Image: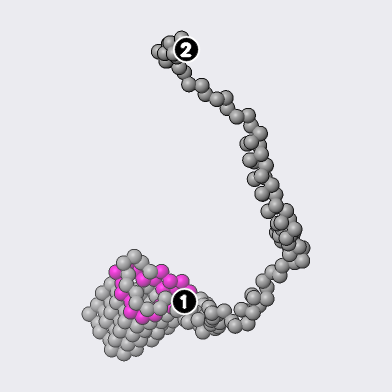
Amino acid sequence: MSDESIIGATTRIRGNVTGSGSLVVEGTVEGDIAMEGDVVLGGAGRVRGSIQGASLRIAGQVAGDLKASDSISIDPGARVVGDIIAARIGIGEGALVRGLVQTEGEPAPRAARSASAARSVPAAPVRSASPSRSAAPARAAAAPVPSRRSVAAKTQASPAKPKPEEKAESKSAKPAAKEAAPKSRKSRTPPAPVVPAVRRGAQAKKKRKAR
């Protein structure tokens, strides 16, 4: 079993701490910590530097990077300002982490991948909205040409103009019709003459005169 070292709550160390065993920090360390075993930072512990070990358990405050070959566990209420790198990482509810969280063997961060993808993707060519000049003659040439059959159909459908002889016959037919009209009127029988009625007094006078 590896040896375990303890930095008490009343202890304050300025400088780097290294060792082959495990370490429990309850006090303050102003420097880097590198251990071959596990490192535990208590709730009252403060570290201003990086921490490296087989597995890390953080319950206090760290201003530096955390790196472990096995796992890193951040307890609720802990505060870490720095990057976290390990094969397995667990962050409790309410813990504050400001930095990059990455597992070993994981691809590059999303920000770096998106930047590299934006550089590798070529820009799409811009298409001009205005049509080219060569397109106008092509459209004009594509207009349909009327066929001979359609022209012949139009000529057959148009009415033929009357000849001058037909016009003369139609004019001569009109006076003949007018002359026939009065003849038919003359051939009608005249109305019977109207005889005026004679009063009785006038007939008596005529008889007296005759006597």
- Establish if 77 lies above or below 32: above
Taking the spot 31% from the left edge, 67% from the top edge, the residue there is: 94
Three-letter amino acid code of the residue under disc 1: Arg
Identify the element where label 2 is drawn.
helix
Taking the spot 35% from the left edge, 83% from the top edge, the residue there is: 64
**Disc 2/disc 1 C-alpha distance (Å):** 154 Å
Left or right of residue 68, residue 78 in this image: left
Closer to us: 150 or 53: 150
The reply to whether discs 2 and 1 touch (Cβ–Cβ < 8 Å) is: no
Q: Is residue 70 visible?
A: no
Magenta residues, start to end = 68-90
Q: Which residue is mark 1?
A: 110
Closer to us: 172 or 211: 211
Colour logic: one colour
Q: Which residue is mark 2?
A: 210
Please say whether residue 4 is one of the residues in the magenta stretch: no
Three-letter amino acid code of the residue under disc 2: Ala
